[in-house]
Image: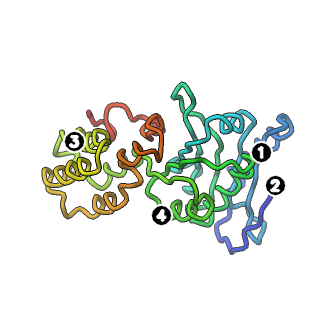
Amino acid sequence: MKNKLYSKRTLKINQADTGGVLEYLEKKTSNEEKFFYSIQVDDDDLITNIFWTDSKMIADYEVYGDVVCFDTTYRKLNDGRPFGLLVGVNNHKKTIIFGAALLYDETAESFVWLFNTFLAAMSGKKPQTILTDEDAAMAKAIKIVLPESHHRICVWHMNQNACNHLSGVVEENKKFNTDFQRCIYDQEEEEEDFINAWNNLLEKYNLQENEWLERLFNKNEKWALHYYRIGLCSRSFIPVTFGPGTKGGFCPGSKG
């Protein structure tokens, strides 16, 4: 399946990289009847985006696809093009893959194509909840393609962003990690308790003027557990499950 992207692309994809991927996809198609892949090209017939999934992924999605986490934090190619995974959790709480993509960029346009293609591969079944990082382009694409799905921010990604935006606080205050995690995970009963805990955290570490935390709080309905508890997403799928290396703290080398 090949879809046109009618906009000028100036970056040519490394043929050694994508050539190997396309060769793999063609072999899988010939060996597996239900293997699905789709490529998007621009008006110069240059490949921009690639998506693929196989029969096991499709079968898993049919059973466990109510909640999906979309992750593009991986980088596959030398030019930094994102490698994205659509993953979920099975009944043993093990991470399973529903599909994979090599994307030209992380624009809303590319994400719209990907989500539409993913739905086509999955016979139109939409997830009840989709977890992503805080990327605005992803949020825009989800509103376009998955308006009825609950969009939530993946807590694992949120923790990683805390490492970047609050690195000085994390390094200087050994207890910040623990306090931040308690603010996220221990305030699921009442909204007022969560707000009080958040304000106490800001005051304790003198972070009342931190712009990233302010933006994060303004989106708290997408990650605070109070909203999960009242039915927007099952507790068993709270997104720390989806991130690699999450045990023992949210920053590399941290001890929670």
Q: Amino acid at mark 4?
A: Ala
Residue labelled with disc 2: 1
- Labels 2 and 4: the sequence-earlier one: 2
Give the alpha-carbon distance from disc 3 to disc 2, as whole Å. Answer: 49 Å
Using the rendered image of the protein, determine whether residue 16 is visible from the camera's viewpoint: no
Q: Which residue is mark 3?
A: 179
Judge from the rendering whether residue 128 lies leftward or rightward of residue 134; answer left or right: right
* Mark 3 secondary-structure assignment: helix
Pointer 3 local density, CA inside 10 Å: few below 14, some 14–19, many at least 20:
some
In front here: 33 or 93?
Answer: 93
Q: Are marks 3 and 2 in contact (CB under 8 Å)?
A: no
Q: Are marks 2 and 1 in contact (CB under 8 Å)?
A: yes
Q: Amino acid at mark 2?
A: Met
Q: Residues within 10 Å of mark 4 (few under 14, many from 20)?
A: few
SS at mark 4? helix
Look at 20% across and 43% down and name the residue there: 176
Residue 26 in view of the camera: yes
Report the residue at 53% width, 65% height from top.
140
Name which quarter of the figure residue 86 lies in. top right
Question: Which residue is found at the position 68% from the left and 64% from the top?
Answer: 12
Image quadrant holding the N terminus, namely bottom right
Crowd around label 2: few <14 · some 14–19 · many ≥20 (10 Å): few
Could you say whether the residue bearing mark 1 is in a helix, strand or loop? strand
For label 2, the SS is: loop
Residue 100 or 253: which is nearer the viewer?
A: 100
Find residue 136 and name its label: 4
Mark with earlier residue (2, 1): 2
CA–CA distance between discs 2 and 4?
28 Å
What's the CA distance linking mark 1 and mark 3? Answer: 45 Å
- Provide the residue designation for mark 1: 36
Residue 110 drawn above or below residue 44: above
Residue 23 x/y as whole percent: 78, 44
